[in-house]
Amino acid sequence: MWQLNLNNGNLKKNRMFEILRFFIFIFFVIVVHVCQASQISDRIEVSYQPIINGKIIEDGGTQMLIATPGNAKAYIDNSGIELIPQTPIEVSYVDFGAKKTFQVAELSNGEKVYTEKNFSEYPEITITNETEKILGYTCTKATSVLRSNSIDIWFTTELQAKGTPAMSYGLVDGLVLKVVRNGNYALEATAVKLMENEREKLVPDDLGEKVTEALYRYKVTNSFVTTVSVFSDEQISWGNTIDNPTGEQVHKVYRFAGGTVILKKIKLPEVTPDYQVFAELTQYSNGDAYDRAGSVFMIPQNKEQSFFDALVKGVESVPAFQAANGKKYYGTVATPFYEPTVELIRFFTPFGINYYNDKVEVYNQEWEQKTYYKQEITELLPLLKGEVWIGTYIGNYDKGGHKVSLDFKYYPGNRTVEEKNDESETWIYPLFNTLNIMEMAGQEYATMFENDSLEVNFLVPENTKNIYLRYISTGHGGWGGGDEFNKKINEIFVDGDRVFSYIPWNCNCGTERKYNPASGNFWNGMSSSDYSRSGWCPGEASNPVYIPLNMINAGEHTLKVAIPIGAREKGSFSSWNISGVLIGEKE
């Protein structure tokens, strides 16, 4: 009897345990489901639109943000937009738990890099009492300052997710729905939606190679740039043995005029008109102590003769300008069968930079190692495509001479692929270049202005408009009475009428002292490199002057340049290096 009652009691206890275990299992299932559902509903996608001065900007991609309570991902959705091939893919991540951000870029060459920052490195945030409704959510206004820019950040805490589409402005503990910079640029949310079925990990484990913020930004911006290396640490000097490649080979360096001219045929990219192109030149002395005239030029080859003929066969093989002083100046002006060189950069070497740095000591002066010249040459872009001859000249009589490097850099004007505009094209006609590039091979100095002017005839095609002259002028004659140190007016005449006049003069040469270790120092504290000069300074490039010639119509015309060149003094004489290119629009 007692045994039976005991067995019945154990049975009831077992049933109770089974029922309890069942309910515990159901409870855990419900908890897991609720947690999963909560995690899914906490993932939010926000899209934004830019507004500038109250106007919605609709071109370009859409700024997107995926946000959760712990992480956020910001990127631009470029769906339906054809980007240029070199465009990198950039994504920003925020880890609120670790208080870190990650900026990630996948470059067009397959390289993947990222930079990491702590929250403390971002602008300080100030929370205000102002609120505003955005898409039905109450947002609080916060403010920050980024490099003198005033930033307003509107964020909501009514959603569990946190994140921002513009983390550089500062990080807040909420979901940013609008940012405003300086009161005139805004990025405002247009839609907020739950991502109900998304379980992908927001911040990937593999972010690529970690780099500094500066290197990251360099890699991203530089990936857009197309760089063509023309010369790399090439010597320009006088009196060394020259052994040129045979024929006209591409990407081979040729030397002419005793080694003072280097030349290379290179293949340049064909780009759309929105690109900007710059020539970047570096130079340092390899033995020569003096300031020298230099030039980066290209040789047109669309006529029967070119300056390449002069380099190979001798300067007298190309047409000459016959001056009133009885001299012939070969290769300087255009004819129906010849076009002179097109000058890309007129530059001047300083006195002995690098080579003489340790040989000359001046109190409180640190010498630079090389000179750097960067000049925009976009207006000549139509000439800089396909296979072209590019040269660099530095006049000197030293076996060590100079070392130069030259790059062309092409910068796109748009992220999207631009269709070529066939309605008009650029018309370019090289008129003259009196710089005696073949100085060391017998080419005359530009002294044709003695009781004379430089005159050239040219033909403007039909339907050509907005014509202007790209003009470079520098005066030379390095003694007190020489034109290097005396102001001389340059006058431009078209068909007998004066259309422009000015005095080329640089009075800022003293700023380049740090590039001129071998410059002479005088009793009064002045250095030779300090003196103002006719359109140039030792260590600088000379800027072109752009002269509008809207009065020119289609047909034949004459352009004349007049300069009152100084008189000779015994063995000293003055000269003027001028180059001019006509540029217009041809419909």
Image: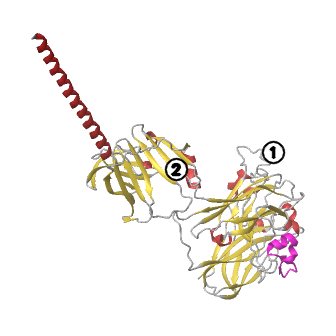
In terms of image quadrants, where is residue 344? bottom right
Q: For the view shown, which residue lies furthest in the left direction?
A: 1
Q: Disc 2 marks which residue?
A: 105
Q: For the view shown, which residue lies furthest in the top direction?
A: 2
Q: Earlier in the sequence, mark 1 or mark 2?
A: 2
- The residues colored magenta run 306-331
Amino acid type, residue under disc 2 in the picture = Ala
Above or below: residue 545 compared with residue 212: below
Left or right: residue 388 versus residue 116 is right
Residue at image coords 72%, 52%: 370
User: Residue 297, which numbered label?
Assistant: none
Residue at image coords 83%, 73%: 309
User: Separation of disc 1 and disc 2 at Cα?
Assistant: 47 Å
Q: Pick the residue in front: 101 or 327.
A: 101
User: Residue 359, which numbered label?
Assistant: 1
Image location of residue 418, percent across then percent down: 53, 69
Q: Residues within 10 Å of mark 2 (few under 14, many from 20)?
A: many
Could you say whether the residue bearing mark 2 is in a helix, strand or loop?
Answer: strand
Q: Pick the residue in front: 128 or 118.
A: 118
